[in-house]
Amino acid sequence: TTMDYSTNDSKSTSKNKVVAVVGGGLVGALNACYFAKRGFQVEVFESREDIRQAKIVKGRSINLALSHRGRQALKQVGMEDTIVSKGIPMHSRMIHSLNGTQSPIPYGKKGQYILSVDRANLNKELLSAAETYSTTKLNFAHKLLNWSTETGAMTFLRAAGAKEEIQADLIVGCDGAFSAIRKQFLRQSRFNFSQTYIPHGYLELTMPPINGEFAMKPNYLHIWPRNTFMMIALPNLDKTFTCTLFMPFDEFENVTTGDQVIEFFQKYFPDAIPLIGADALKRDYFHLPAQAMVSVKCSPYHLSDKCVLMGDAAHAVVPFYGQGMNAGFEDCLVFNEIMDQLNEDFSAVLPEYTRVRVPDDHAIADLAMYNYVEMRSHVNSKWFLFRKYVDNFLHMIMPRTVIPLYTMVTFTRTRYHEAVKRWHWQDKVINQGLLCVAASVVGGSYLLVRYPPNMPNISIEQLWTRLQALKSPF
Ligand SMILES: Cc1cc2nc3c(=O)[nH]c(=O)nc-3n(C[C@H](O)[C@H](O)[C@H](O)COP(=O)(O)OP(=O)(O)OC[C@H]3O[C@@H](n4cnc5c(N)ncnc54)[C@H](O)[C@@H]3O)c2cc1C
Ligand SMILES: NC(=O)C1=CN([C@@H]2O[C@H](COP(=O)(O)OP(=O)(O)OC[C@H]3O[C@@H](n4cnc5c(N)ncnc54)[C@H](OP(=O)(O)O)[C@@H]3O)[C@@H](O)[C@H]2O)C=CC1
Ligand SMILES: Nc1ccccc1C(=O)C[C@H](N)C(=O)O
């Protein structure tokens, strides 16, 4: 069957223009709300069955960390409170050392936290919100096979194997890290694309409640940092924790039997064994093979005035900053702001969106790579903890001059690429400042030893003359 939803009328307004959102995941469902709110006719095409009716929900992580950018994007379509009310605040990282001691590292100031939210519920709520607009239609079991850059026609595979051809005024590719929409971009001249699989994989385990209560303190993101790998745990509403082990694939390959799993956990995460349960651990570890993680960067995000990529389709990032979804949600918000500025003129909005958004999404992709090293290794270093303390202190006394990187990324809408620039600048200045302080302390101590306080009173001039006569202590 062929359906032509497009208006082919340059004078048509949003009221009768049709936007096809391909992918009804987190970003697609939110985007549907944005376009519907503006008055467009929205058709969402999702390859899977309706997640709200699905018995088994397939998909990546069970829960996600939601922070300021994502919340702001939800707020714009009136969804923030609904989602936040079902989130569990995490105020700090909780570091589990090998000997079982736990020490918190706050994420920001008092009252600043990230939220652990359930992925499936978030997706369901967003789909239902999109459906409240009478102009939105959700089409499940529609898998995009291909689309034509010349005509804009999209070919979908239906459940029974039938094919359906569909046209729209604008195609919004929200079809995730392995986007089928993006495939056509690869054939365009001057389209840049890179894809990197990191050599680490991940595996999820569940930590059940103990006597009906959370097995660990709930308002934390728990981390077992082991330098070259780590395990983390985020709380769920049903009082379980979802633990995720991130580790090089080589290491995963070394653990092949139940006994080896216990041996491995005994060596690196002994405190987690009784909490997950030895039997469950032996069984669940092999439930699924370790999953790969990919980072995708591309540019531009648009193709003429016909098609635009958002969310993971435009920028899959490794999960370590907890920003993939947040960045995808912010894409919708930024696009919406540009739609306001440029009067919904797609031929102007799409290039502007690429211009504004590419540097920021590329910056968060790099930051996400960096945060893995911070989480699995730096948090073990005294110097890192000291620097974090100094940054927080300086932020407290000069809140506008010094803003820690984590705060900029997680608790503000500072553009990601500006956060990176500022971080480098601040780091340089603070390190130089610390060096000066250290040098003064060493110099001062030397003087004190050389000229103990009971020395006779001398004038500044005399002291200066003596100082000049000294040989450098270094
Ligand atoms: C382990 C892990 C942990 C993460 N943790 C966090 C976190 O804490 N915080 C955070 O912000 N982000 C996190 N992320 C990232 C987050 O999952 C993604 O950024 C987010 O899901 C992107 O949403 P999306 O809608 O762009 O893509 P998806 O959620 O993948 O949705 C894409 C949708 O498109 C559909 N689709 C695919 N192909 C087609 C097709 N051909 N035709 C039609 N439909 C199609 C899919 O079925 C899917 O429903 C994590 C990711 C991983 C892997
Ligand atoms: N940054 C990352 O490392 C990754 C992030 N994600 C993100 O996680 C979230 C949920 O993912 P989820 O829905 O579970 O994704 P899935 O892994 O279930 O994949 C969704 C679809 O993508 C296709 N696909 C999967 N793996 C590959 C691959 N290696 N190469 C080409 N196509 C592939 C499959 O399509 P088909 O049916 O045609 O085979 C699959 O149905 C999404 O945001 C996704 O974008 C997902 C993977 C990695
Ligand atoms: N959600 C995640 C999933 C996987 C790995 C990390 C996260 C994080 O959220 C990390 C957090 N932002 C941190 O820096 O401690």
Image (tube, rainbow, N blue to C red):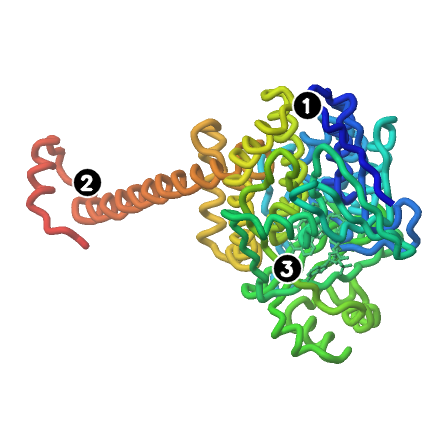
Q: Earlier in the sequence, mark 3 or mark 2?
A: 3
Which of discs 3 and 2 lies nearer the camera? The answer is: 3
Q: Which of marks 1 and 3 is nearer the N terminus?
A: 1
> Which secondary structure lies at badge 2?
loop
**Does the residue tagged 3 have its C-beta within 8 Å of any atom of ligand 2?**
yes
Alpha-carbon span between mark 1 and mark 3: 42 Å
Q: Name the residue under label 1.
A: 10
**Quarter in which the C terminus is drawn:** bottom left
Can you tell which quarter of the image residue 99 is in?
bottom right
Position of the N terminus, as image quadrant, is top right
Residue at 72%, 63% (x, y): give it: 203
**Residue 237 rendering spot, x and y as whole percentages:** 83, 45
| Ligand 1 is within 8 Å of the C-beta of the residue at disc 1 | no
Front-lying residue, 440 or 161: 161
Q: Which of 340 and 384 is in front in this view?
A: 340
Q: Which residue type does callout 2 highlight?
A: Asn
Horizontal side of residue 460 vs 356, given as left or right: left
Q: Residue at x 67, y 33 (%)?
A: 332
Q: Name the residue under label 2.
A: 454
Q: Nearer the viewer, mark 1 or mark 2?
A: 1
